[in-house]
Image: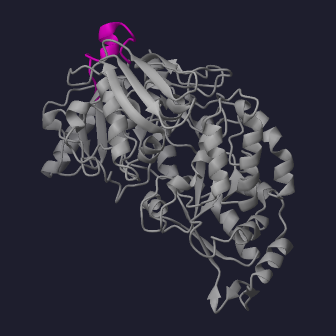
Amino acid sequence: MAIWATRAWRLALLCGIALVACTSEQAPDDLRQVPRNRTLIVDCAENNTCGGQIQDYNTFNPFVPGGISRIGYQFLYEPLYFFNGYKIDAEPLPWIATGHRFNADYTEVAVDIRPGVEWSDGQPWTAHDFVFTVNMLKEHAPNLVFSTDMETWVQEAVALDSLTAKIVLKSPNPRFLFSYFTHNHGNGVPIVPKHIWEGQDPLRFANYDLASGWPVVTGPYRIALSEPVQRIWDLRPDWWAAKTGFHALPQVERLIFLPYMEEHQRVQNLLANKLDTCLELRPSNIITLLEQHDKMSTWTGREPPYSYMTPWAITLGFNNMEAPFDDPEIRRAINFAIDRKQLVEIGWQNSGDYALLPLPDVPQMQPYFAAAADLVAQYEIGVHDTARTASIMSSKGWTRGPDGFWTKDGEVFSLVIDIFAHFQDLTPVLVAQFQAAGFDASFRMTSDYISRMAQGEARAFMFGNLSSMRDPYQVLSHYHSRFARPTGETAEHYWRWQNADFDALVDRMAQTPNDAPEMMAIYRQAIAIWLAELPAIPLVQWPHRIPVNETYWTGWPSAENPYMNTSYWARSWLLVLLNLRPVG
């Protein structure tokens, strides 16, 4: 047997899992044995793999746009606060921060740091790390994730002492800490150690050197192995929270991330108990799992709808700087070609709901849905009328050729939609609708999906609108023109739309507390512009149908115990790890 295969078998036995094909970078001889019932196994959330391998296995820089897979950084850079949007009237949960104080006009905020927090190399976590991260991002705008936001808002960040930081803002922002330093789903700025990152070029710093103990994090795990076919995290008993009595160690002793899998592979591995949870599944596959495995469960247990609503309402997005999608009337013509009910009925087998706004359909957002109902009707967002599509296209000089597709100046209207795997059930239905309306539509699913959107190469794409689940500011702020970059330059948010009046209203929203009487009026004005211009077309709400395998682990979040959402690629995953308990 080849040396690599021998080592692979040894690793499989040590991990207590089925064999995973390994490369020449193998398990070190000191990789300790961990029982299967103390090991949690998941697959990568991103399809950024090549030949079944993790491309970024040797990097750990969370600030590069379109950057690293969520195979560690999302739960090991602990935040100032966590927030659980699945509990009504939930408040942020203090974690590394113990509290904060805004001044009267929300232009300054002082943050108190919890004593005793340590980095994984034993160095204290202090206000200097928080301040360093803010200033590093501010100094490298717009090239790092969250850097544009820090440059937009922060006038000065200083450490008053090791446990107190002060942020002076350029203008009032009562949401500053909640928007950027409270981890909620896919949102939250990772705070990095000053003593490691200082002097590094954050655009190129890999932040990965196991011999040096990198990456240095605060969470309760260290990398035991990272190679193209897996990343293994092992529990480290010296986690600051256990040492200080803030929280007990998690009972998950080993966490293994395997490469991205196609859906049928996820189902097979769940049935064989080789995965403990995975990315969301189609309804038919969820039902198959529940029928064939008595230890399988979901957010709603073993009964429909098997899902929870995410803060990520899905839209058809565009590079709004490039023709023909730079014309709002063309975008409206495309909107009239969409039959959303059919998308849900056929694409999702009636296991979801369509969307007419870029907001998640969760309880906290219902007042904003009600406030915009007349505007949605006025701008006919939900109207499916291909005759209206034809009228607009004809008025713009397009004619239907012998093949039935719209043409102009000898060019066919090509509508190529970039997607990732989650949307491969919906997109064929959408493409068929567009073709019937005269658009030469197709879709593609590539491993460079994120970078294509970030660079503007994707002219049309399906993507979500990340919400705070408290108010619409975060969603709308991502359409602010401060994020617009010319095609070919990396954009943090991909819409590439610019409207000065909209910008001004979003800026006012940022300065207005949620409960202020004027908040709803500002929102109505902003969403009216958005609906009139339609820089992205709302399609569907996104329910997460995530299976959980209770063969080895129990304590998963659920509708009965919604202490957090189930998605392990979210920045709240640490709280799930802290609640899981081994079976038996």
Quarter of the image where one finds residue 511? top right
**The furthest residue to the top:** 245
Residue 380 position within the rendered picture, expressed as x and y whole percent measured from the top left: 84, 59
Q: Nearer the viewer, residue 201 or 503?
A: 503
Of 60 and 160, nearer the camera is 160
Horizontally, is 380 left or right of 557 in the view? right
Q: Residue at x 70, y 50 (%)?
A: 540
Name the foreground residue: 299 vs 361. Answer: 361
Colour approach in the figure: one colour
Residue 317 sits above or below residue 558 on the image: below
Q: Is residue 179 visible?
A: yes
**Image location of residue 448, percent across then percent down:** 42, 61
Q: Is residue 282 visible?
A: no
Q: Which residues are magenta?
A: 234-250
Tell me: 91 left or right of 149.
Answer: right
Residue 489 image position (x, y, % from top left):
42, 64
Residue at the image point whose x is 36% and y is 48% from the top: 68
Q: Residue at x 83, y 50 (%)?
A: 375
State the residue at coordinates (20%, 20%). Answer: 122
Residue 417 in the magenta stretch? The answer is no
Number of callouts: 0
Please identify the quadrant where the C terminus is shown. Answer: top left
Up-down relation of residue 572 to residue 563 (above or below) = below
Tell me the quarter of the picture where residue 325 sits: bottom right
**Percent x, y for residue 8?**
22, 44
Vertical comparison of 45 with 530: above or below: above
In the rendered image, residue 244 lying in the magenta stretch gets the answer yes
